Image (spheres, coloured by chain):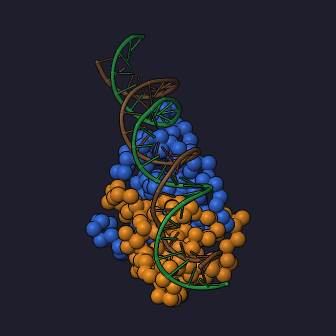
Chain colours: A blue, B orange, C green, D brown
DNA sequence: TAATTTAACTTGCATTTTAAAAGTTAAATT
DNA sequence: AATTTAACTTTTAAAATGCAAGTTAAATTA
């Protein structure tokens, strides 16, 4: 996706404005996934060629990086970069939106309450656990 | 987009996870646009058939509503619903992400500073000015 | 150590979506 | 009465997606 305008919202969408990219970010951020096969097994089951092309785009855009696994040479380790990690507040607000407007979904009450009472603290805490 | 999983993030993406939907929301939220032709003239120039299909989807999903204009019978008035308005925090976080990570974009300093020092107050203030 | 399995992809192809341009209809304006 | 405007729809080509199968190197198992 090439740059469409100088709008900061449009800019974010140029990076992650599709059905899949933010799910990859989610898996790296919240679920401790780091490998291709782990990402492929997420609940939404994205096609492998799409996963591949999205990882490439996210890496090109500097939101994730890719390194060889030191123990298993077949594997690659995918990690969020600093700018990828900074997408967390956007994801958190999405969770809160669904908590309010999609009550049929079961969303961890604790997370939602914490987000409402101490958003900044929660964000710091979550960030501290990413990529570890 | 049919429901892909019970994930709250995936859920939001099922509503607005594409290149265009959030730009429509942005125009209704920040730029006081309310008609088809105004939306069509935004900087990113979305194709008219795509605008049409996105408006239909957003309306079906309950994020916007559509009413006949009372003065000009050719016109329709598009407005954010309560759940559409509640996307504001997501958009705000996108603006803040770009303010931090896309310094080449010129983003209103005042808005960014206000968002950083008094996010809740800013959100209330912005909401008070939507659909008026 | 040979055979099998795993991980991370790529390729091919049918289907779906998008983009660009032109066309339609009703209402307003000139 | 003729023209313009607003809100679309239609058409068609191009691009993206989704699905299945195939590839390659490395690790594991028999």
Quadrant hosting residue A26: bottom left
**Residue B30: where, in percent of width, then height?**
57, 79
**Is residue A110 something one can see in this rendering?**
no
Of B63 and B34, the residue lying toward us: B34
Of A24 and B55, the residue lying toward us: B55
Q: Is residue A127 above or below residue B26?
A: above
- Residue at x 33% of width, y 70% of height: A102
- Residue at x 52% of width, y 37% of height: A70
Q: Is residue A32 above or below residue B53?
A: above
**Is residue B52 something one can see in this rendering?**
yes
* A47 displayed left or right of A76: left
- Residue at x 38% of width, y 63% of height: B11
**Residue C29: where, in percent of width, then height?**
62, 85
**Residue B79: where, in percent of width, then height?**
46, 80
Q: Is residue A96 above or below residue B79?
A: above
Of A114 and A63, the residue lying toward us: A63
- Residue at x 41% of width, y 66% of height: B57
Of A108 and A120, the residue lying toward us: A108
């Amino acid at each position: 996706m090439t740059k469409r305008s100088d709008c900061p919202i449009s800019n974010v969408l140029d990076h992650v404005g599709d059905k899949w990219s933010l799910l990859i970010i989610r898996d790296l951020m919240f679920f401790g996934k780091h490998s291709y096969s782990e990402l492929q097994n997420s609940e939404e089951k994205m096609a492998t060629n799409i996963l591949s092309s999205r990882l490439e785009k996210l890496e090109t855009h500097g939101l994730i990086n890719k390194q060889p696994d030191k123990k298993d040479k077949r594997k690659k380790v995918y990690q969020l970069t600093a700018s990828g990690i900074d997408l967390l507040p956007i994801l958190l607000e999405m969770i809160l939106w669904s908590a309010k407007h999609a009550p049929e979904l079961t969303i961890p009450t604790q997370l939602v309450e914490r987000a409402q009472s101490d958003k900044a603290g929660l964000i710091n805490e979550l960030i501290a656990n990413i990529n570890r």
